[in-house]
């Protein structure tokens, strides 16, 4: 019994000492290095325009105007709620999933003037795991490009070039998949032809 | 040219294989007290800790004392975390109270503290609306390190059981756990976490950002010391994420490279322990055989999961949505990065998934579920994976020995009746807790009340997955299950405690008995311990135990759902 008590004393001291190292010293050192070496990334890769934060390069946002590229469906809150990350968690046999995909497909085909049975990249009609996916697939962006070009009065070739410019390739060529960053692409569109807000008002 | 996802799997396996030897050698040096290049800095810190805590470096412990030390260390860690969580509202920095929508109730705090201190990190809450930054750093990040180090120490003590001869002791837990933190966890965590920040993972203590989008919509973006938690959760094979979406969240996993780093953090040290094992018992080939078994089962699992997910949902494909199953997956990671993470995290006792397993195809989710049901012996949890696979190998060798009428032995250690009882206690504790708790949940209102998203077969899979994951000390969930209720908080906590201590204690006691034996000389009649035959016997035993215990449960779950998918 006495030896158990003395072991408990050791355990208390050791847990406190190691917690101090792993829970206080380690985060503090990491914070110092991160803020010194990568200040923008360490602070959330925020995108600032005219002194206002318009979002983060890494966090997806809802876009509804016809002059903008649209992100994937989102299950985070009512859509791209930064405080409610998560997926739909609907199982593959859940009829609600099938219904959601069907509705998303109909809406996607209608807004992009596609024929009723046109193939659509699956990422355009399914929700991501985080509900905050900042990217869409290249095929998805290309299907939306004619609509955006038409609304903004831009040459389709220019919009295509902008998609290429905002495509992020897989790390080292093999890790992950290529994707187009929706916020950065829309930001570039606004500076090329500032038509976004008027379109939304219409 | 091979498809990108296949290349990705191949390169990952290659990197792990190349790192096994150097990491394994390093681990052996650290835990044998030999010189390493980090000594000039760390020796002084180590000495200071021993002085404060009153630890005598040369005081060896027998198996029972070692187990008691593990329990006391875990108990104090649990208590500290519980207190930190209950009083978290007093801390100044971090999100203000209005965004913390989930109350830290006593049962949630208890579940969370047991969950983190058993390296399970089952999370019944969403980090961004529950936790203050101080809870995430001092509470959760520290326990990620400490619980991971505890597992590593147990693994090393287990190896000593095979390596030592006629010795009543297994080492000193206090020294092992301290070295695990100082020489393994913290240096790797620092390097890995800085690399993650470079890839875009935030590391700040700022309040949440209020953004106004180009269309004028408001968005609140959470911030915090994300990088401080994200790498250690994988390294300690815990997996308790900063955010609800865990590694699917772009702040935790911004690129394909960050995904690779997180997967390596889970896999490399547990894989390298096979080399450490071979080196410490003086039979290097025996270590490679264990690694080869892990590799074969790992690749088989990835292949099936990849096939199921790329094939996708027939009901979705029928509507001409092309590209496999992307529900619950991120574009930047793709099916390849998500399948790899599903295999790695389910094998590696790590809850840090990067895609929603609830939305995987039935045969896609069968793989992570089976990996956990097999006892996480494929690389496995930090330290725990090694004894998991050896326990299975011992069952296999016992069966093989019965068939040819020889006394089962492994590496010159005789597996007698008492040793075998400990192996069986270990092997049976795990299915019993999973099976009984699943049955309890599907027969009670409190259990069925958790099925808020999916029902029927899929709902049953969610419940089975929850108890498997908590008993396996994994912590990943099929998140459609609403698990923050008193019923689930208490029953999963029970499963986590059984999964941690009913496995670690028999493993330590077995090691203690083996250490007391001498080493039997090899005769022509001895079953070899380091040949492909042993590897095949181990795989056979794993499949046999898994199938005998769990096949009916899988048949009623993923397999049934698969066939119902084919006939809408």
Image: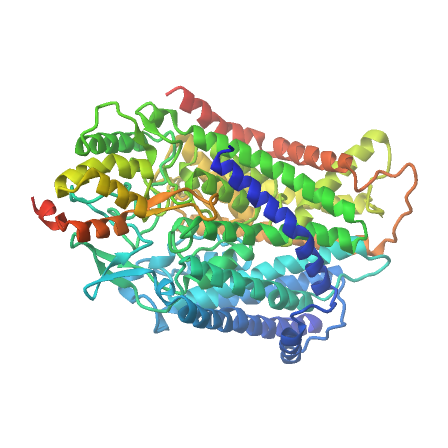
Q: Where is residue B331 in the image (x, y as percent from the top left)?
A: 37, 42
Colour scheme in use: rainbow
Q: Nearer the viewer, residue B150 or A110?
A: A110
Q: Can residue A139 be seen in this view?
A: yes
Q: Position of residue A81 (x, y in %)?
A: 27, 52
Image side of residue B166 versus residue B52, left or right: right
Q: Residue furthest left?
A: A202
Image side of residue B414 versus residue B99, left or right: right
Q: In this view, does B489 lie above or below B64?
A: above
Q: Nearer the viewer, residue B480 or A121?
A: A121
Image quarter for residue B167?
bottom right
Q: Total marks drawn?
A: 0
Could you tell me which residue is drawn at 20 percent across and 66 percent down?
A: A51
Could you tell me which residue is drawn at 63 percent across and 66 percent down?
A: B183
Q: Nearer the viewer, residue B212 or A162?
A: A162
Q: Where is residue B231 in the image (x, y as percent from the top left)?
A: 50, 58
Q: Quadrant of the C terminus of chain B?
A: top left
Q: Residue furthest top?
A: B567
Q: Can residue B501 be seen in this view?
A: no
Q: Position of residue B425 (x, y in %)?
A: 69, 45
Image quarter for residue B97?
bottom left
């Amino acid at each position: 019994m006495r030896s158990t008590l003395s072991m408990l004393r050791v355990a208390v001291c050791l847990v406190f000492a190691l917690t101090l190292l792993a829970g206080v010293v380690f985060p503090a050192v990491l914070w110092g290095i991160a803020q010194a070496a990568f200040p923008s990334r360490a602070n959330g890769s925020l995108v600032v325009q005219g002194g206002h934060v318009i979002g983060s390069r890494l966090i997806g946002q809802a876009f509804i105007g016809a002059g903008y590229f649209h992100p994937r469906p989102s299950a985070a809150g009512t859509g791209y709620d930064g405080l409610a990350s998560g997926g739909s968690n609907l199982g593959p046999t859940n009829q609600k999933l099938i219904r959601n995909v069907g509705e998303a497909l109909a809406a996607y085909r209608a807004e992009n003037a596609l024929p009723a049975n046109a193939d659509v990249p699956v990422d355009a009609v399914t929700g991501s795991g985080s509900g905050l996916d900042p990217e869409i697939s290249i095929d998805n962006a290309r299907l939306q490009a004619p609509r955006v070009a038409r609304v903004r009065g831009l040459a389709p070739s220019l919009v295509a070039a902008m998609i290429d410019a905002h495509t992020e390739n897989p790390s080292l060529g093999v890790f992950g998949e290529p994707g187009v960053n929706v916020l950065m692409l829309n930001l570039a569109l606004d500076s090329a032809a500032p038509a976004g807000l008027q379109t939304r008002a219409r | 040219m091979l498809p990108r996802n296949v290349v990705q799997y191949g390169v990952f396996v290659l990197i792990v294989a190349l790192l096994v030897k150097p990491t394994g050698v390093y681990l052996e040096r650290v835990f044998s007290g030999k010189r390493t290049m980090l000594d000039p800095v760390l020796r002084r810190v180590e000495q200071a800790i021993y002085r404060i805590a009153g630890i005598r470096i040369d005081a060896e412990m027998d198996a029972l004392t070692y187990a008691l030390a593990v329990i006391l260390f875990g108990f104090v860690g649990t208590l500290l975390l519980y207190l930190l969580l209950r009083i978290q509202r007093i801390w100044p920095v971090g999100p203000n109270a209005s965004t913390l929508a989930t109350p830290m109730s006593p049962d949630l705090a208890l579940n969370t503290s047991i969950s983190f201190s058993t390296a399970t990190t089952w999370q019944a809450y969403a980090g961004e609306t529950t936790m203050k930054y101080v809870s995430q750093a001092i509470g959760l990040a520290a326990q990620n390190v400490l619980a991971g180090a505890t597992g590593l120490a147990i693994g090393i003590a287990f190896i000593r059981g095979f390596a030592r001869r006629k010795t009543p002791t297994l080492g000193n837990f206090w020294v092992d756990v301290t070295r695990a933190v100082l020489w393994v966890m913290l240096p790797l965590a620092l390097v890995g976490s800085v690399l993650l920040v470079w890839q875009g993972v935030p590391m700040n203590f700022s309040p949440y950002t209020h953004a106004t989008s180009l269309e004028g919509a408001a968005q609140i973006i959470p911030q915090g010391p994300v990088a401080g938690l994200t790498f250690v959760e994988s390294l300690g094979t815990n997996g308790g994420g900063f955010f609800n979406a865990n590694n699917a969240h772009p702040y935790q996993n911004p690129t394909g490279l960050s995904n690779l780093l997180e997967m390596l953090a889970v896999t490399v040290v547990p894989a390298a322990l096979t080399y450490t094992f071979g080196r410490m018992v003086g039979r290097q080939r025996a270590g490679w055989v264990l690694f080869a078994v892990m590799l074969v089962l790992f690749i088989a699992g990835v292949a099936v999961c990849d096939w199921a997910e790329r094939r996708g949902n027939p009901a979705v494909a029928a509507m001409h949505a092309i590209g496999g199953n992307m529900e619950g997956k991120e574009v930047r990671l793709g099916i390849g990065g998500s399948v790899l993470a599903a295999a790695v995290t389910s094998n590696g006792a790590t809850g840090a998934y990067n895609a929603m397993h609830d939305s995987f195809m039935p045969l896609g989710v069968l793989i992570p579920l089976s990996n956990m049901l097999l006892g996480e012996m494929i690389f496995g949890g930090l330290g725990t994976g090694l004894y998991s696979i050896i326990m299975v190998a011992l069952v296999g060798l016992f069966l093989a020995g019965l068939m040819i009428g020889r006394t089962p032995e492994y590496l010159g250690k005789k597996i007698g009746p008492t040793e075998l009882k400990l192996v069986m206690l270990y092997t049976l504790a795990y299915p019993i807790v999973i099976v009984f708790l699943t049955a309890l949940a599907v027969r009670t209102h409190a259990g069925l009340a958790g099925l808020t998203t999916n029902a029927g077969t899929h709902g049953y899979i969610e419940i089975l997955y929850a108890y498997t994951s908590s008993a396996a000390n994994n912590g990943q969930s099929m998140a459609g299950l609403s698990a923050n209720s008193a019923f689930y908080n208490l029953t999963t906590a029970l499963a986590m405690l059984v999964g941690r201590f009913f496995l670690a204690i028999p493993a330590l006691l077995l090691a203690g008995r083996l250490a007391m034996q001498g080493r039997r000389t090899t005769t022509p009649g001895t079953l070899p311990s380091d040949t492909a035959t042993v590897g095949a016997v181990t795989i056979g035993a794993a499949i046999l135990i898994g199938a005998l215990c769990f096949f009916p449960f899988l048949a009623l779950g993923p397999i049934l759902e698969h066939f119902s998918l084919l006939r809408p």
